Image: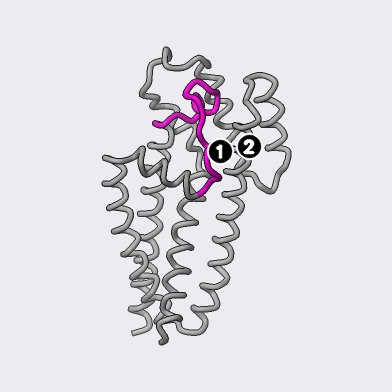
Amino acid sequence: MSKLNTILHYTVVWSLLLSGSILLTFYLPIVNLIYRYDPLPESAYYLSPSARKSIAQLGLDAVTRIWNSHSWNKFINITQQRYCLTSAEIKHMYDVRTLIVYLWYIFFGCIGISAYLFSKNKSFAHLCARNAAQGILLFTLVLAIGAYWYFDEIFELMHKVLFTPNSWIFDVRCALIQVYPEWFWQAAGCGMAFNLIIVCLIALYISGKQEKHVH
């Protein structure tokens, strides 16, 4: 097995597991789950709890239901009329929506490539899946420990990498930050880590079972 082929196998498996776990987080009812445990007092916000939760759900639907333009149009109409989201805030939400689209492309592309690689060499594909899942589990653990101490720095770095410069910087009093404050993303990050661990454990179980079957 050539080194290039090995790198391809591991890259595809890593991309598949990571993109799948991130997408799973955003398509779960995270707004209802996270908003049950708001750690800040109501005096920290100028929007009511019901308004913040409503905008949060509208925004999540707008960026995840990429096949349905109605969700995006509904988000635009309601937030501009009732909650005065600025054009910069809406543009950032659209950037997030575009990122979700790319994640779906990566996810489905990796599924197709994985199926092809699996058909060529089943035993090596299972080995790559097992080793990649183990590597991601270790990566998740290290990242979780790092995020506990340096969440702000990691969060800022991710935005610098994924979005255009300064397009994601907003005043703490703006509606978007009121709806998706730092603690929201801390909780969402915990959800992503949990999903990633579950997905990797499933991959380890399936690859181990298939390897026993082969032998």
| Mark 1 residue element | loop
> Up-down: is 215 above or below 147?
below
Quadrant location of residue 204?
Answer: bottom left
> Up-down: is 208 above or below 57?
below
Name the residue type under label 1.
Ser
Location of residue 180 in the rendering, given as x and y in whole percent from the top left corner: 49, 30
Question: Are dots 2 and 1 in contact, CB under 8 Å?
Answer: yes
Name the residue type under label 2.
Lys
Q: Which residue is mark 2?
A: 91
**Which is nearer the eye, 15 or 31?**
15
> N-terminal of the two: label 2 or label 1?
2
Q: Nearer the viewer, mark 2 or mark 1?
A: 1
Instruction: State how far apart marks 2 and 1 are (Cα).
Output: 8 Å
Tell which residue pokes out farthest to the top in this image: 43
Circle on res. 167 = 1
With 170 as the anchor, is 97 left or right in this view? right
- Name the quarter where the C terminus is drawn: bottom left
Q: Magenta: predominant secondary structure element? A: loop
Q: Residue at x 53, y 23 (%)?
A: 174
Q: Residue at x 60, y 43 (%)?
A: 95
Q: Is residue 131 magenta?
A: no
Q: Is residue 164 magenta?
A: yes
Q: Residue at x 37, y 60 (%)?
A: 200
With 172 as the anchor, is 68 left or right in this view? right
Q: Residue at x 61, y 32 (%)?
A: 88
Location of residue 102 in the rendering, given as x and y in whole percent from the top left corner: 59, 55
Tell me which segment is drawn in magenta. 162-183
